[in-house]
Amino acid sequence: MVTERLRRWLPLLAALIWAGVIFSFSSIVSSNLPDTPIWEALRNPSLDAPSLPDAPSLAAVPDPDVAMWEWITRKGAHILTFGVLGFLVAAAAAALQLPRPGLTGWVVATLYGAVDEAHQAFVPGRTAQATDVLIDAIGALLGVTLWWYLARRRRRPIVR
């Protein structure tokens, strides 16, 4: 009895915890975020050119690809984060035997992405962007699709 009840409510608990993790990361004030791009930190200062009187350091030369890779990393994080949320909400909806758990997972995760972006508008130095909501919706759709595939595969009988 206890294990059946736990099995029904555990996915919802996991989705709520994940939503809390998302909220905590989006609450970080921009002054507490690193000033340098993510990929800038990966540069190794020991690879600089030998110190010549007027030679610039290789680390000081701007890299045009850094901004692009940082954008890809940030948007990829949105897709991954909301993909996990969509997956967890769909699993919770299925465990609670709600109708259309995949649709429920996608709608809830997408709405949470919109609320999260609105929340960021009130965090100093952060902005709300409609494109991020769209990217969150794509991530949620990918997560729900993965849940659907795994749930369908689990129900399929094994044929030998």
Image (cartoon, helix red, strand yellow):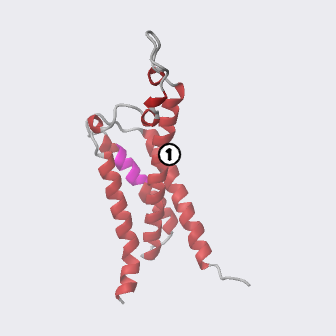
Residue at image location 39% in from the left, 48% down from the top: 114
Q: Secondary structure at mark 1?
A: helix
Three-letter code for the amino acid on which mark 1 is drawn: Gly
In this rendering, the answer to whether 130 lies above or below 60 is below
Q: Quadrant of the N terminus?
A: bottom left
Residue 109 sits inside the magenta stretch: no
* Quarter of the image where one finds residue 12: bottom left
**Magenta part mainly helix, strand or loop?**
helix
Relative to the observer, which residue lies in front, 109 or 17? 17
Q: Quadrant of the C terminus?
A: bottom right
Relative to the observer, which residue lies in front, 155 or 114? 155
Q: Position of residue 21 (x, y in %)?
A: 33, 55
- Residues in magenta? 110-117
Q: Which residue is mark 1?
A: 76
* Image side of residue 156 versus residue 7, left or right: right
Relative to the observer, which residue lies in front, 46 or 120? 46
* Residue situated furthest bottom in the rendering: 1
